[in-house]
Amino acid sequence: MFIGEFHHSIDEKGRLAIPVKFRNDFKNGAVVTRGLDKSLFLYTNKEWKKLAEKLDKLPISQSKSRAFARLMLAGAMDVSLDKQGRVVLPDYLRSYCNLNKKAVVAGLYSRIEIWSEEEWERYKQQTENSSNDIAEALGELGV
């Protein structure tokens, strides 16, 4: 289970250190892809396989299904941790989420999200300001 918020730097080669407490989960490799809200999603190979199988079952006759599958699958790349526990984030993914020097790594149970520090702060502030409305809406769903 991935939880927590961590601030890291990205070096000139596009390498990002994965928090020490998460590294063992990625010892057999990982997949990074475009996420939502201008973030990247990093999955263990096991979790990625589960998601990819679900995406493969979406009806191709529906344009939103096709679009979401393309977003997630076409943007995906296999990555592995180096000896220092870093992954290389490709240029096209860093561009997608406006990621430059400072990143936030957020654990979200079955995946890690990677954000530019600026986008994360903007998103977090907006979400915190709406927390009561969000809680009420989720309450209606039984959360």
Image (cartoon, grey):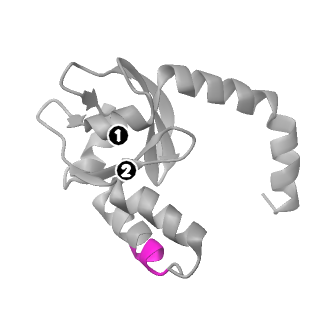
Q: Residue at x 23, y 37 (%)?
A: 87
Residue at (59% x, 77% y) in the render? 62
Q: CA distance from mark 1 to mark 2?
A: 7 Å
Residue 91 sits inside the magenta stretch: no
All told, the count of numbered labels is 2
Q: Which residue is mark 2?
A: 33
Residue 37, position as x, y percentages in the image? 57, 41
Q: Is residue 60 left or right of residue 22?
A: right
**Would you name the residue on which mark 1 appears?**
93
Label 2: few (<14), some (14–19) or many (≥20) C-alpha neighbours in 10 Å: many
Q: Helix, strand or loop at disc 2?
A: strand
The residue under the point 35% across, 40% down is 93
Q: Which of the two labelled residues, at mark 1 and mark 2, occupies the earlier sequence position?
A: 2
Q: In the image, is 141 to the left or to the right of 50?
A: right
Dot in front, 1 or 2:
1
Q: Nearer the viewer, residue 36 or 128?
A: 36
Q: Nearer the viewer, residue 76 or 87?
A: 76
Q: Is residue 16 left or right of residue 100?
A: left
Residue 55 is a magenta residue = yes
Residue 13 rendering spot, x and y as whole percentages? 18, 25
Range of magenta residues: 53-57
The residue located at (53%, 20%) in the rendering is 118
Q: Quadrant of residue 81?
A: top left
Main secondary structure along the magenta-highlighted residues: helix
Amino acid tagged 1 = Leu
| Observer-nearest of 95 and 123 | 95
Tags 1 and 2 touching, CB below 8 Å: yes
Instruction: Give the residue type at disc 2.
Output: Thr
